[in-house]
Image: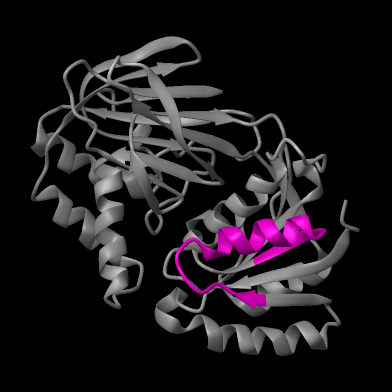
């Protein structure tokens, strides 16, 4: 086993923040050295590369990681760590790892749940003090359907914040497409929401939470979260707690569209769960399955990244990870 290294390992996404991340990182490096914070760094070269970099660094003994970018960069670094932790040949527990972020991307919803500042200099002060808390990690497994109707695992992802299927996933697809051509800012999420509303439709699904069917029918959207914030400040699962071992779920069934649109502002006030027509619950494990005869076309987004299509299961892992945070564990 590689010797444990307690210096910080920074993975820089040079494309975050419409290319601003490199200049932000260069300034951050000066302050890191001024505060005598020991670190090493590397740059990701393409989508998904940070996963490989984080896994390799973990195998070499690094236990403290900084993602320099937005929510997508954090998602990749987490998945690299988890690929190492979940390897049957590994004996290092998840609790040995610490993950933080220098926020330079257009989306930084996860850090809001931890009360973290969006100013990189202020985050470096927190790194120097090594202020951390523990939080849950969710394992998401997608399934492929065989010719005989059997479901077999086809892909595994891990999440720190929130996932969505249907409307939420479609909004994420639009956001990512606009980011790819240089759009940025918090309003990019709201504009994408309005775009998706113009082509609104429902889909059929069955949802099983901790072994009990909680929904079977037509719905517009589903959100699953351990953190409350997503989409530039929306709170689809406002009661989510980062370390309670539970996954919060909001299902928006097929209801009258004018009524639904009139309730959308509640996404920003943290009261969307109080709408009586919606379904809100907590569970350790949730399965989202296709209804008979329905083709799996709805996108799944996890921490702002579109990762595939359902069927999918979400499970809160028994171990927790340490993260840079100003919140205290309950």
228 left or right of 214? right
Q: Would you place residue 306 above or below residue 143 in this image?
A: below
Residue 221 relative to residue 232: left or right: left
Residue at position x 23%, y 18% in the image? 291
Whole-percent x, y for residue 312 in the image? 40, 30
- Residue 255 is situated, as x and y percent measured from the top left of the image, at 14, 27
Q: Residue at x 31, y 54 (%)?
A: 172
Image quarter in which the C terminus is found? top right
The answer to whether residue 283 of the structure is visible from this angle is no
Instruction: State the extent of the magenta-drawn residues as a range.
Output: 42-66
Magenta span has 59?
yes
Q: Residue 106 in the image: state x and y as whole percent.
A: 42, 70
Closer to the camera, 244 or 272? 244
Is residue 110 positioned above or below 85 on the image? below
Does the magenta-highlighted stretch encompass residue 172? no
The quadrant where residue 206 appears: top left
On the question of residue 127 being in view, the answer is: yes
Which residue in the rendered view is the most extreme toward the top?
Answer: 212
Q: What colouring does the structure picture have?
A: one colour
């Amino acid at each position: 086993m590689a010797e444990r290294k307690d210096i910080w390992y920074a993975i820089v996404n040079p494309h975050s923040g419409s290319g601003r991340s490199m200049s932000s990182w260069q300034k951050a490096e000066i302050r890191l050295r001024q505060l005598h914070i020991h670190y090493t760094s590397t740059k990701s070269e393409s989508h998904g590369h940070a996963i490989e970099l984080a896994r390799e660094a973990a195998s070499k003994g690094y236990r403290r990681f900084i993602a320099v970018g937005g929510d997508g960069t954090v998602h990749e670094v987490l998945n690299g760590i988890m690929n190492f932790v979940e390897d049957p040949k590994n004996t290092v527990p998840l609790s040995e790892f610490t993950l933080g972020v220098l926020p330079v991307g257009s989306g930084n919803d996860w850090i809001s749940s931890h009360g973290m500042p969006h100013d990189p200099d202020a985050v470096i002060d927190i790194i120097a003090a090594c202020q951390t808390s523990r939080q849950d990690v969710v394992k998401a497994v997608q399934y492929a359907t065989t010719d005989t109707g059997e479901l077999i695992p086809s892909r595994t992802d891990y999440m720190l914040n929130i996932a969505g299927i249907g409307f939420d996933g479609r909004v994420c697809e639009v956001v990512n497409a606009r980011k790819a051509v240089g759009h940025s800012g918090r309003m990019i999420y709201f504009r994408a929401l309005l775009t998706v509303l113009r082509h609104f439709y429902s889909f059929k699904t069955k949802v099983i939470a901790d072994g009990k069917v909680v929904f079977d029918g037509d719905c517009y959207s589903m959100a699953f979260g351990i953190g409350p914030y997503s989409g530039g400040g929306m709170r689809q699962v406002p009661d989510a707690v980062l370390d309670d071992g539970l996954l919060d779920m909001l299902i928006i069934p097929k209801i009258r569209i004018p009524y639904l649109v009139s309730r959308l502002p509640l996404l920003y006030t943290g009261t969307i769960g109080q709408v009586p027509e919606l379904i809100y619950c907590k569970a350790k494990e949730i399965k989202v399955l296709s209804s008979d005869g329905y083709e799996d076309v709805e996108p799944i987004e996890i921490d702002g990244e579109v990762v595939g299509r359902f069927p999918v299961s979400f499970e809160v892992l028994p171990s927790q990870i340490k993260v840079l945070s100003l919140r205290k564990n309950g």
